[in-house]
Image (cartoon, coloured by chain):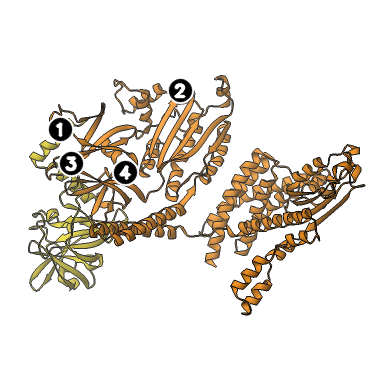
Chain colours: A orange, B yellow
Amino acid sequence: MDDQRKAFKEEAYELLTELETSLLELEENPEDKDQIGRVFRAMHTIKGSGAMFGFDEIADFTHNVETVFDRVRSGQISVTRTLVNLTLSARDHIKALLDASDTEDTVDDSQAKMIIDGLQELLASSESDNADDITINEQHPSVEILTTYRIRFTPYPEIFSTGTNPLLLLNELKELGECTIVAHTENIPPLEELRPESCYIYWDIILTTDKDKNAIKDVFIFVEDDSVITIEAVAEEDGFGMTEGGHDKLGEILMKRGELSGENLEKALKSQKRIGEILVNEKLASKTAVKAALAEQSQVKKRIEQRTDLSSASSIRVPAEKLDQLVDLVGELVTVQARLSQKAVNQSDPDLVSIAEEVETLTSGLRDNAMGIRMLQIGTTFATFRRLVRDLSNELGKNIELTTQGGETELDKTVIERLKDPLVHIIRNSIDHGIELPETRRQSGKPETGTIHLSAVHSGAHVLINIRDDGKGLDPDLILKKAIEKGLVQGDEDLTEKEIQSLLFAPGFSTAEKVTDLSGRGVGMDVVKKSIESLRGSIELDSKKGQGTSINLKLPLTLVIIDGLLVKIGAGFFVLPLSSVEECVELPKETEVMKNGRHILNVRGEIVPYIQLRTEYGIRETRPAIEQVVIMDVNGKRVGFVVDHVIGGHQTVIKNLSKAFKDVEDISGATILGDGTVALIIDVNKIVKS
Amino acid sequence: MAIEGVVETSQYLTFTLDEEVYALDIKQVREVLDFTEITKVPRMPGFMRGVINLRGGVVPVVDLRLKFGLTKTEKKVDTCIIIMELTLDGETTRIGALADSVREVLNLEPDQIEPAPKLGMRLKTDFIKGMGKKNDEFIIILDIDKIFSSDELSIALENEESSYSPGQANETDDDQALRI
């Protein structure tokens, strides 16, 4: 029972999220019947399963909302802002009830009463002007039932003389739904007998539609008196049973009884002609008649296939921990596989090598698959922001529209979960500090409605997320003034605009003139930056005064496995993130000799600063004769890292370093190599900073 | 005299560091391993010897001799790594400790344990839960949670940095000046 309650709660939370999206959609397109239907169904499900699993309070409350939406669905109440507002607060109340259902907390009843009263009012007002609405009601049968019709249209020969073009009628039919048309031309006489003003053709039309028979009849309304029109609904089982059948075919029965061998049956079947061919050959049916019948068969078949597709493409619910376990196990497997590969190469046994390679392919497939299961679309997170933007902009008296793009971009579940808070913070900032009041916007020649644009896109092993607003942008002077006030900079430095903007990320920086309810509570962009960095991501800000601000987030697809470049320094192994490696070069001997107090490398005429990881990490083993420099892209700059040897690419399963090493900043984790030794993963961003 | 927190018979794992016998509450010991290759983690104090691969997990290893002001543990036949489980910043973690040898599991009654003397001890009395006595031999019972408290790890780090040997310090300074 507890499991069922849990399942219900999970389902209900999902429905509530969907409900929110639908409601916001409805606010924009109040006529959208689909969304109204969706809201109704969500409420209906919550009520029904709620009552079943003992959530009586929720069921009772939801019943009220459902009643109202039943009326909306039948067109008696129209969608208004008041209705959307009420339903949104009803949704919040249901969520509060759900949250409280497993705890001792009680939810404030007054809220519920207020919502119910509001809904009752809507109901009452709809009843008073019921009279006009009934007609609307009839016009919109909201439930979609698709039926397939077999239509034969035989126009009378003189149809052209009335100016009717049968093709237009057929086109009209096509608009009703999925349609296959077969023309019967066998009645066309030889040319010398043909009268051009007569119609010799008749049509068989197979139509799958959600309209009823009358709607089809309406198409033929002007010709039905003289033409022969038959419309029959096709029971889908008919067509299906004939071809595939629930019963065995004759040949199969004989085979099962052992009276016929499979070989002979096949031979017999080959010699057997298709029924269509036989009928045509025997002149029992015309070729076109067979063609029309086949068309009907294939359309019905297609419908049935679609239906089975729908039911089989369902999903199953799996607890998140099980997925985490799976990914952990796959991580271990990748480690073992690396060990196997190494061993195989050492043994120089070709058979073993080929097995190891096969295991490698399978493992990487399995890894991608396991990772893929954990991937979620970022769209659901985007959707929750619409509510945020709506509520906050109302509160502040601003007009803000949220547009999103790339909602189907997939990211690891953990990344998405931990991304939500920083994003909320950034969007709040945009609403609070970025977008101006409508009045101000008009004065500066912008449209009154401000826009916040959220987009996500894949880029290699990363996902780029962009949050852009067309608000007032950042004022460099104001930032600088504030930074000097807070003692973050002295004021006499010559800072570029970009450097000034990056001051926003300094701890304890908040430019809001006054502290509002929304943002500016001391936790600023530095927290955002920290959370993004903890996801191995980076954040960049770009702003033009008066034109808006754009924030770019770069995030890894997953946190568990990265592609790394394995290098060796002294006796120790280290891993550099392969995604930012640009090239590897040798460290020229003379560079080291004539260092002139600078660590600078000349790579094809380009100046690249480099870091000696050996001295950085205090490794004392003797240097090799030739050292390698790995040149990496660190925050848009090329930086070299000197190592002893570059060993090669390595599938790196990231293991967290123990808490005991929390003071080590430039090592982001460890991994276990094929032979069981531990390699440390270098965080290049941190090391360049220090 | 019995001391606070030790009220019932407990089992202890005894081990030696430089001829002296120490003990750990068996409840915190997970397993004892042979000495294996330790990967050094840069910029850590000397007593943090590095990390080892424990069946696919990464576990830090501490040199208790260095921590207690003795010389560095050298690999000998009996050298072991004792894997302990303890809570660090509210998280359960595994930490390995190097021991010159591991002896036995011992039952000690509460009356066999006395509080640590304030004087005459080489280590901080904070680290000692009590002194056990068995067959006229003193056993130092360690308070592992105190030794590996996160504060202790950080303090050690600072001390270590300030007591860097002059030669090394010069080298580092030099490099810092050269770096851009």
Helix, strand or loop at label 2? It is loop
**The disc numbered 4 marks a residue on which chain?**
A
Would you name the residue on which mark 3 appears? A614
Is residue A544 visible to us here?
yes
Would you name the residue on which mark 1 appears? A592
Q: Which amino acid does label 4 sit on?
A: Pro
Which of disc 4 and disc 3 is earlier in sequence?
Answer: 4
* Same subunit: marks 1 and 4: yes
For the residue carrying disc 3, how many other residues have a C-alpha within 10 Å: few (<14), some (14-19), or many (20+)? some
**Toward the viewer: A419 or A55?**
A419
Which of disc 4 and disc 2 is earlier in sequence?
Answer: 2
For the residue carrying disc 4, how many other residues have a C-alpha within 10 Å: few (<14), some (14-19), or many (20+)? some
Would you name the residue on which mark 2 appears? A545
Which of disc 3 and disc 1 is earlier in sequence?
Answer: 1
Q: What residue type is labelled 1?
A: Glu
Residue A151 % position (x, y):
81, 52
Q: Is A683 on the left-hand or right-hand side of A23?
A: left
Which of disc 1 and disc 2 is earlier in sequence?
Answer: 2
Would you name the residue on which mark 4 appears? A577
Residue B143 % position (x, y):
20, 60
